[in-house]
Image (tube, coloured by chain):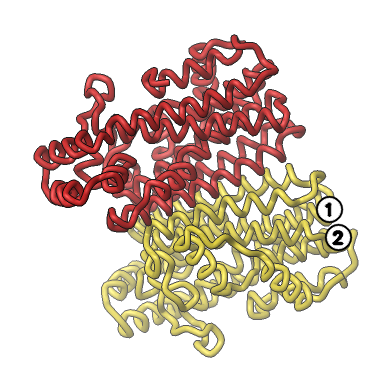
Chain colours: A yellow, B red
Amino acid sequence: MNSLNDLIARYFSWCNRIEYPEEPRRLYDASRYFLESGGKKIRPILCLLGNDLFGEMSYDSFHAGYAIDLFHNSSLVHDDIIDHAPLRRGRPAIHIKYSLPTAILTGDIFIAYAFAHLNNVREQYRHQIHTQFSRVIIEVCEGQQMDFDLERRELQHVSYQEYLKMITLKTAALMGASIRIGAVIGGADSQEQAYLYEFGKNLGIAFQIYDDYLDAFGEPSETGKQPGGDILENKKTALLIKTWEAGSTSQKKALKNAMSKNGFEKVSAVLELYRNTKVDIWATDKTSEYTQKAFYCLDMITGVTAERKAGLIELTNQLLGRRC
Amino acid sequence: MNSLNDLIARYFSWCNRIEYPEEPRRLYDASRYFLESGGKKIRPILCLLGNDLFGEMSYDSFHAGYAIDLFHNSSLVHDDIIDHAPLRRGRPAIHIKYSLPTAILTGDIFIAYAFAHLNNVREQYRHQIHTQFSRVIIEVCEGQQMDFDLERRELQHVSYQEYLKMITLKTAALMGASIRIGAVIGGADSQEQAYLYEFGKNLGIAFQIYDDYLDAFGEPSETGKQPGGDILENKKTALLIKTWEAGSTSQKKALKNAMSKNGFEKVSAVLELYRNTKVDIWATDKTSEYTQKAFYCLDMITGVTAERKAGLIELTNQLLGRRC
């Protein structure tokens, strides 16, 4: 059994040994540039914790976790193109720093390397993990398309249910798959795998809604960024969609009006509507609701000691600001 | 043992049964639009022929061939974005007909479905094929990056050796992998697999150089398109690179001058230089040379009857206009 910090340290030290070719230079420079840019490594750590929950740590879960993180990075590189995002992790996105072609190819090659790493998993679990991994990539792509489609629709034609389906595919499914894959390697039975998938999925939903909340109401000292980025872009967050759904006719009108403004005036007008419709409280309630669902699923894993669950609980608390 | 036409018919009939989800609609409409647009299916047929060479046809090679074709289609969808190509197989490219985001996601999801299909291969060969498949995707991405890099360099800084390396990665490696994967399923030993990989790789190099030749000197009645498309775009084909390398100082100067012209005048000036430097003959000689290398490798497969090789020979003749 490993502490969360030990696992994170072991994972980073293991990753640092992985080397990529030098040529073609631009492709691998871009790959290294992106992979070295950090990121919270939530998904590979979930994979390691899934393994750690049931048994001794195996290098299989390092390979699988790394594969998951490579695919996650692939989806970010391609998503930044789709969203015209100039920055990622505080640095120019690949399609800006290198080029659109190199960004497309970097995302593609990450997927190929991900499957290559997965091939290192021992034979006993390889097929099952390969199947789950290709399935979740399909889901994430479907979620990315849905996100793109929802962003192009008028706000009044987007429901919270559709949003929920979109984030389940785009964000939550991969978090579910990450811990389940680790659990497979740890030797979990199919019932335990299913509960852990649900744990990760619900954690992912809570995480995304809380991320939307923080963009509007987070403390810059805590989030490291000025609030309101999503508001300025009219991004269809949980809060925006819910404000439209829950708002009175006059509040709907005020929201449309606020969304047509710019800069600080826009942010403060939208935030006021979020508060008036109590969507701020609704969002933290939803975060708690999905976190509780996640913990319920973790509770259903009865065959392991409470001590073994400590890392997962600690990670959840870190991610959700102890709102659980 | 199956005739080439029987195999092609069986493959198309098998593919027609594969269905994709309906939602997200734009993503799967785009996927179907591209997959239904035809293509010569050289790679999956090579895979089937690799199987057929050694034993009874197995559905494993249909799954593997389909996976290879999905990845090939993925690379075309992304390559059309990279090349700003408006058309593919005579119809608008996905990034034109749908959107850039949908084109990126279609390419991504094709890779995921490719691996999902590969999971259907029987356990005995699955790991080996997975390893070869992820390896060749990496190579194709490297080749695509190299192609992009070469296109941005001045002609005098691009060598035929670099071109050869680029097409080997971008085009020939996948043809080699296609037949080798089929041969694995057919039960070929590692020596036979290596020869067949070399067969496919050399066939792929011959195919690409001949394709460059046809763009300049092909009969419209045979190729179905007006010659000179590559010339109009200053595309760094084997012929253009070789003309620069082989040309005298005055021919180099004339080539640069020709390349700065437009339309018919440009095509005819460049074609004249191709003829003057005898690069037209050189290109057909190179096609023959690589085709002979391919057949040499096929000859080295001594454990099967000549009859079993008939399909591969017929396919090669079809691809290379009986220049072998």
Q: Residue at x 15, y 48 (%)?
A: B254
* Residue B168 can be seen in this image: yes
Sooner in the amino-acid sequence: mark 1 or mark 2 = 2
- What quarter of the picture does the N terminus of chain B occupy? top right
Tag of residue A125? none
The vertical placement of A109 against B109, above or below, is: below
The vertical placement of B191 against A4, above or below, is: above
Please, what is the three-letter code of the amino acid marked with disc 1?
A: Ala
Q: Is residue B46 left or right of residue A154?
A: right
Q: Is residue B11 left or right of residue B92?
A: right
Please, which residue is most extreme toward the left here?
A: B265
> Which subunit holds the residue at mark 2?
A
Q: Are marks 1 and 2 in contact (CB under 8 Å)?
A: yes
- Residue neighbourhood size for the residue with mark 2, other residues' Cα within 10 Å, grouped as few (<14), some (14–19), many (≥20): many
Q: Position of residue B64 (x, y in %)?
A: 60, 31
Please, which residue is most extreme toward the front here?
A: B248
Q: Residue at x 66, y 44 (%)?
A: B131
Q: Quadrant of residue B278?
A: top left
Q: Position of residue A105 (x, y in %)?
A: 46, 54
- What quarter of the picture does the C terminus of chain B occupy? top left
- The residue to which callout 1 is attached is A188
Q: Position of residue B52 (x, y in %)?
A: 62, 18
- The residue to which callout 2 is attached is A54
The vertical placement of A297 against B134, above or below, is: below
